[in-house]
Image (cartoon, grey):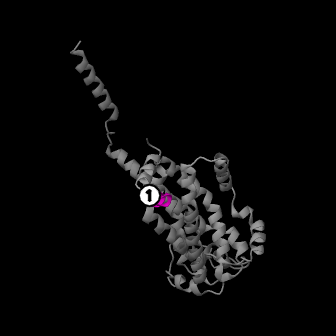
């Protein structure tokens, strides 16, 4: 009986070894995976490549009946001349986009951090109803509420101002930020807060110096989604902002599309410029954003 135990253990170990050994990858598998990866990459990158090539073509070449993918003559001056076109003051539009997106993101963080922390740490009457309302508001978009927003900001004397768009973008991004950061704060043990309070730390100290480093991946995820949402907002900006210099790039882009003629080289050029800050932001905080999205998937 004593000799059977080691034998049974060795059998189990061999079975586990067979079960969890690494897959034997042959050269053909590597080649097929490489081809599949390149094909998927080309499918996703192709629209951006075509957009870039079109941005350095002349107007006549873009409208040619026999178009080509690569430009015959590279018109890099398009990226210079588009900043001084009569259709729209593009430098002011870029500044407006940056200011609105940054201020709205900061406002969302200032409100959502304490709100999500309080929801995760305290139980109060109506808590579940409040969280349900947070989810419901995520279904609303500025496009379906433009008429109401116009009348509201008309009464507040905030029409055609950056602050109006900051408040609108922050309001419609707040629910997502609160919901995602609430789950991160809820995953932090309450004993950590209690230990810090025993050492004399206040609630704000516990929030910003103890909990914030632990939930930083969730904060980064909320930042990136809020910033991208504010950067790409179009419908409310089109209605609320009437001055050309205060409109963001998403609205300024439509100024190059006329009734009888469209400056496609500027449309593509502005589109390339508009996506560069978002791509750079993704590259800077990609690792933290991925860890934030995957947090909680594995116990």
Give the crowd class for mark 1: few <14, some 14-19, many >=20 residues within 10 Å.
some
Magenta region's main secondary structure? helix
Q: Nearer the viewer, residue 27 or 199?
A: 199
Is there any visible trace of residue 244 in the rendered image? yes
Image coordinates for residue 210, horizontal then vertical, percent:
43, 56
Image coordinates for residue 235, horizontal then vertical, percent:
69, 68
Range covered by the magenta-colored residues = 201-209
Q: Residue at x 31, y 27 (%)?
A: 15
Q: Is residue 83 left or right of residue 33?
A: right
**Badge 1 element:** loop
In the picture of the structure, the residue carrying the numbered disc 1 is 201
Q: Is residue 120 left or right of residue 212?
A: right
In magenta segment, residue 101 = no
The quadrant in which the C terminus is found is top left
Check the image and report above or below for 5 versus 120.
Answer: above
The quadrant in which the N terminus is found is top left
- Quarter of the rendering containing residue 88: bottom right
In magenta segment, residue 204 = yes
Q: Residue furthest left?
A: 3
Q: Nearer the viewer, residue 227 or 170?
A: 170
Q: Residue at x 78, y 74 (%)?
A: 155
Q: Nearer the viewer, residue 170 or 208?
A: 208
- Quarter of the rendering containing residue 7: top left
């Amino acid at each position: 009986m004593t000799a059977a135990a080691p034998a049974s253990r060795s059998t189990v170990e061999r079975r586990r070894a067979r079960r969890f050994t690494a897959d034997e990858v042959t050269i053909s598998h590597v080649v097929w995976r490489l081809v599949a990866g390149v094909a998927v990459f080309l499918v996703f990158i192709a629209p951006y490549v075509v957009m870039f090539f079109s941005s350095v073509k002349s107007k006549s070449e873009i409208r040619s009946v026999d178009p080509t993918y690569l430009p015959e003559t590279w018109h890099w001056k398009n990226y210079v001349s588009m900043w001084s076109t009569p259709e729209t003051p593009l430098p002011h539009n870029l500044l407006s986009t940056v200011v609105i997106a940054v201020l709205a993101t900061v406002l969302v963080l200032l409100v959502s951090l304490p709100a999500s922390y309080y929801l995760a740490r305290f139980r109060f009457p109506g808590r579940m109803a409040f969280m349900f309302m947070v989810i419901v508001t995520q279904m609303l978009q500025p496009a379906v509420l433009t008429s109401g927003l116009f009348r509201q900001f008309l009464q507040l004397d905030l029409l055609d101002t950056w602050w109006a768009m900051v408040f609108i973008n922050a309001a419609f991004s707040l629910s997502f930020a609160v919901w995602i950061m609430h789950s991160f704060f809820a995953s932090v043990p309450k004993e950590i807060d209690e230990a810090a309070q025993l050492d004399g730390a206040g609630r704000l100290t516990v929030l910003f110096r103890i909990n914030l480093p632990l939930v930083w991946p969730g904060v980064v995820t909320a930042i990136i989604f809020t910033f991208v949402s504010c950067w790409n907002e179009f419908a409310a900006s089109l209605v609320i902002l009437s001055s050309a210099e205060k409109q963001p790039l998403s609205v300024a882009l439509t100024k190059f599309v006329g009734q009888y003629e469209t400056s496609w080289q500027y449309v593509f050029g502005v589109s390339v410029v508009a996506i560069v800050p978002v791509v750079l932001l993704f590259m800077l905080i990609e690792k933290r954003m991925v860890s934030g999205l995957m947090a909680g998937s594995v116990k």
